[in-house]
Amino acid sequence: MDPTTPRTDAVPVVLDGSPLSIADLARVARATLTRPVRVEIAPAAMARVAASRAVVQRALESGKAVYGLNTGFGSLSRVRIDHSRACELQRNIIRSHAAGVGEHLPREVSRALMVVLAASLARGASGVRPETLERVVAYINHHIDPAIPSRGSVGASGDLAPLAHAALTLLGEGEIWHNGRIEPAAWATRSFGFDPLQLEEKEGLALLNGTHMMCAIGALLCHDFRTAFGAALSAAAMAIDAAKATDRFLDSRIHDWRRQPGQVEVAARLRGQLAGSAILPSHAVDDPRVQDPYSLRCTPQVLGAALDAFRFVEGAVERELGAVTDNPLVFAAGAGAGDGNTAGDIVSGGNFHGMPLAIPLDLLAIACSHVAGISERRTFWVVSGFDQFAGHRPYLATDPGVDSGLMIAQYSAAACVNEIATLSNPASVTNIPTSAGIEDYNSFGSTSALKAMRCVSLMRSVVAIELLVMAEALETHRPLKSGAGVEQAHAVVRSLVPRLDRDRAPSPDIRAIEGLIASGAFGGA
């Protein structure tokens, strides 16, 4: 059986050598059999792959020792490997490096990893055969998604262990996701008519060497942070009117003098959401409060700083989505071979090192800590009932004492914030050497990615709790309405979560709002 890709009416993602977009990667990673997104390889990309493979073939014919082609790996790079054992070497590097432990990566991360791998190979600097790239893409399109243990990468010589588990499935070995379960990969090779892939020189290393796991996670996190940040802005705007705060601290002159772009943007967006509010002028006269708490008054400064940090992270990820992080790199003639070498060139380097992503991903966790932290403080301020001028019953309870209202929702937000704070300790600042010391400075960017993945999820939960609380608090001020943007956000919450008339379990409401945030219902960063 000649494997063919499933038909789909969705706009395909074409691998043509240009950088993947975060949106396209998320589309493929989160596609399903019922809502597929096809990946295709552009003819020009296939031509580049063939040209780089020709460089590998000429190097092999020369008889010279070239790392990754006819030598061992890492500290074993001085061991020469005869051509008769080349396939065995490539197969063995995959088997031996599949040493991951821990829970499996989510299926969407495995899919994203495969797409990042395919896009990198399609740039024609890795020296693989065209049929190897085609097999990777066929697996993506058939939803043959590797089951990859989440721990094992030190984020320097590529994400070796996770990528080895992914590559193992191309050999008909290892495990895959199927119907929500983990099954042996061998059934896929039989069911879809794929013979186990026979790797040749350089190919095993090309499949393992790269930052593809941390890049895939980073891209999905950028997509998810963006939607959560949009919801955080809506929640903050709702909180200003829910707490009957002033909007004077949003005056553009204040923020223009600080000169921080994120702060200026956040203040402007909050002003926009509150525009037309009838609640703001209702307490403009004879309000005894001189200033609001920092969690309200300093929202532009805190969220603005987080937004600036996120945009740095997003830029790093976007650049990585156009990179080749293999080693050695193969330069075909006329494609950066250098020195006028018409036969092409093969050059060893360190593009597999994860530090360009490790530091940004550590920063993303810190950004999450502040978006969530200030959100929880606003939630606490409103549910506590401290500010009598705001007119809220303790915990927004219908009958305080008999009812506890949203008391414990704030506890949950506090627990999430504490966990994020714990996870915000950077992984990239600690080094542990590997491979008998030849790999003596590692990034641990994969740990940064896994921590950030948890932080973004927890941040979403904290913001969902604030939206739940502020939607309820706004009801206290009826019939007065807030600005159009705030009222739209309130309506989004109420589309799934009814008003709290008496105590009920808040957990299903929080989950429902989390789903709304993930869908982008509150906009983005």
Image: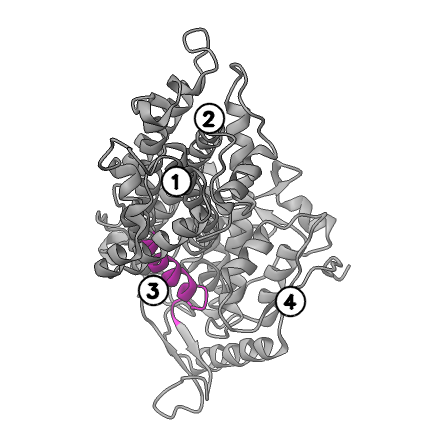
- Magenta region's main secondary structure? helix
Please check the rendered image and state whether residue 493 is part of the magenta-colored stretch, yes or no.
no
**Numbered mark located on residue 476 in the image:** 2
- Which element carries disc 1, helix, strand or loop? helix
Kind of residue indicated by mark 2: Thr
Q: Quadrant of the N terminus?
A: bottom right
**Numbered mark located on residue 456 in the image:** none
- Camera-side mark, 4 or 2: 2
| Tag 1 and tag 4, C-beta contact below 8 Å | no
The earlier-in-sequence mark between 1 and 3 is 3
Kind of residue indicated by mark 3: Val
Please check the rendered image and state whether residue 316 is part of the magenta-colored stretch, yes or no.
yes
Q: Residue at x 48, y 27 (%)?
A: 472
Kind of residue indicated by mark 4: Glu
Residue that carries the numbered disc 4 in the rendered image: 40
Residue that carries the numbered disc 1 in the rendered image: 280
Near-viewer residue (10 or 138): 10
**Numbered mark located on residue 79 in the image:** 3
Kind of residue indicated by mark 1: Leu
Percent from the top left, x then y, of residue 36? Answer: 68, 53
Magenta region, residue range: 307-328
